[in-house]
């Protein structure tokens, strides 16, 4: 009688990796890179207060520019009616008050763990525009990547607190082509564990095309800070997104690393615990 051999345990399931070809290559935000090592080996982690500081600066600059333009145009407005300049100044003052109050509410929502506005008026509304303009201002100070990282962390924190749940077939995981082998294997293992599809793009405009075709109810996206800002601006206003930034120890677009534990927690939370 032949001996009975135990069968090997099944391997951890791995998700199917789907490539999407589109018309804008990833990494275009790094066209000016000179090939030198990135600061802190491509880890741009920064405290959220950095974003809030630059956001306040951005708001002050924007209101200052608006006030300057209004000052220059006031004589012309007065030719229409003597009260027009006063009305316009009052409107600008009211807009400034609303903008500063909204920024305070944003900070309170982040630091007190109490969401004070619906998502369309917070992280999926004006916040996306503020992120974009703040990123532009921070470039003048050479702090773009750090400010963007802090902004994305604020966005993710607010989005996570919504505690959204979707079905496995309603979640997409979007990744770039530049992950290291270890990071890619980890992503595929996580996606396989919870039975969600993974899409990888060799070129840009990935999110719009995949989302249009798959119609998910939520997305977990992986990208560097620069590409993530573009992706959030394009997608987060239309459907919920969690954006996981990468570390770039070998420069942009090559052997990127990411926090796999955080990705696992996000996917598990969205699909309600997985399989």
Image: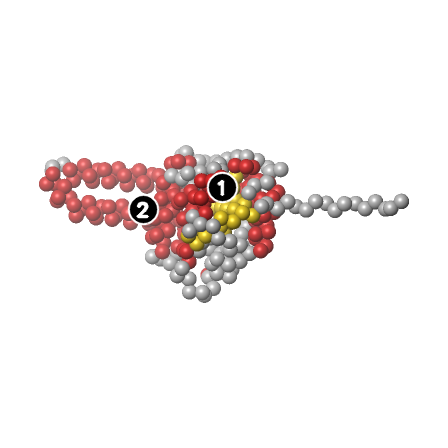
Q: Position of residue 212 (x, y in %)?
A: 45, 40
Horizontal side of 4 relative to 268 (left or right) equals right
Label 1 crowd bin: few (<14), some (14–19), many (20+), radius 10 Å? many
Secondary structure of the residue carrying numbered label 2: helix
Q: Position of residue 100 (x, y in %)?
A: 32, 41
Residue 273 in view: yes
Quarter of the C terminus within the rendering: top right
Of mark 2 and mark 1, the one earlier in the sequence is 2
Using the image as rendered, state which of residue 130 and residue 240 is in the foreground.
Answer: 240
Horizontal side of 91 relative to 178 (left or right) equals left
Quarter of the N terminus within the rendering: top right
Q: Position of residue 215 (x, y in %)?
A: 47, 37
Residue 163 in view: no
In this rendering, the label closer to the viewer, 2 or 1: 1
Horizontal side of 260 relative to 10 (left or right) equals left
Among all residues in the image, which is located at the extreme right?
A: 1
Choose top left, top right, bottom left or bottom right for residue 128.
top left
**Tag shown at residue 219:** 1
Residue at 59 percent across and 37 percent down: it is: 273
Secondary structure of the residue carrying numbered label 1: strand
Label 2 crowd bin: few (<14), some (14–19), many (20+), radius 10 Å? some
Among all residues in the image, which is located at the extreme left?
A: 79
Choose top left, top right, bottom left or bottom right for residue 194.
top right
Q: Position of residue 87 (x, y in %)?
A: 18, 36
**Vertical arrangement, residue 106 with respect to residue 58, above or below:** above
Inter-mark Cα distance, 2 to 1:
30 Å
Instruction: Tell me, yes or no, whether the two marked residues, 2 and 1, touch with CB atoms within 8 Å.
Output: no
Residue corresponding to mark 2? 59
Residue at 32 percent across and 49 percent down: it is: 58
**Vertical arrangement, residue 6 with respect to residue 182, above or below:** above
């Amino acid at each position: 009688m032949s001996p009975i051999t135990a069968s090997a345990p099944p391997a951890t399931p791995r998700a199917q990796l789907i490539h999407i070809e589109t018309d804008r290559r990833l990494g275009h935000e790094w066209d000016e890179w000179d090939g030198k090592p990135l600061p802190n080996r491509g880890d741009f982690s920064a405290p959220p207060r950095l974003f809030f500081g630059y956001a306040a600066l951005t708001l002050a600059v924007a209101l200052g520019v608006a006030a300057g333009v209004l000052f220059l145009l006031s004589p012309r407005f007065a030719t229409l009616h003597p009260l027009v300049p006063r009305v316009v100044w009052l409107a600008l003052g009211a807009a400034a008050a609303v903008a500063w109050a909204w920024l305070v509410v944003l900070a309170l929502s982040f630091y007190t763990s109490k969401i004070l506005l619906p998502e369309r008026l917070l992280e999926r509304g004006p916040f996306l525009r503020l992120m974009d303009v703040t990123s532009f201002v921070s470039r003048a100070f050479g702090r773009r990547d750090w400010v963007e990282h802090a902004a994305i962390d604020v966005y993710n924190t607010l989005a996570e607190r919504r505690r959204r749940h979707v079905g496995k077939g309603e979640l997409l995981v979007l990744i770039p082509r530049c992950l290291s082998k270890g990071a890619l294997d980890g992503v595929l293992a996580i996606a396989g564990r919870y039975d969600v599809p993974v899409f990888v793009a060799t070129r840009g405009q990935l999110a719009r095309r995949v989302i249009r075709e798959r119609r998910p109810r939520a997305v977990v996206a992986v990208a560097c800070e620069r590409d993530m800002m573009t992706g959030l601006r394009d997608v987060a206003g239309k459907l919920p997104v969690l954006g996981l930034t990468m570390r770039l120890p070998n420069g942009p677009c090559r052997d990127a690393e990411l926090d796999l534990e955080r990705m696992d927690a996000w996917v598990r939370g969205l699909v309600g615990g997985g399989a």
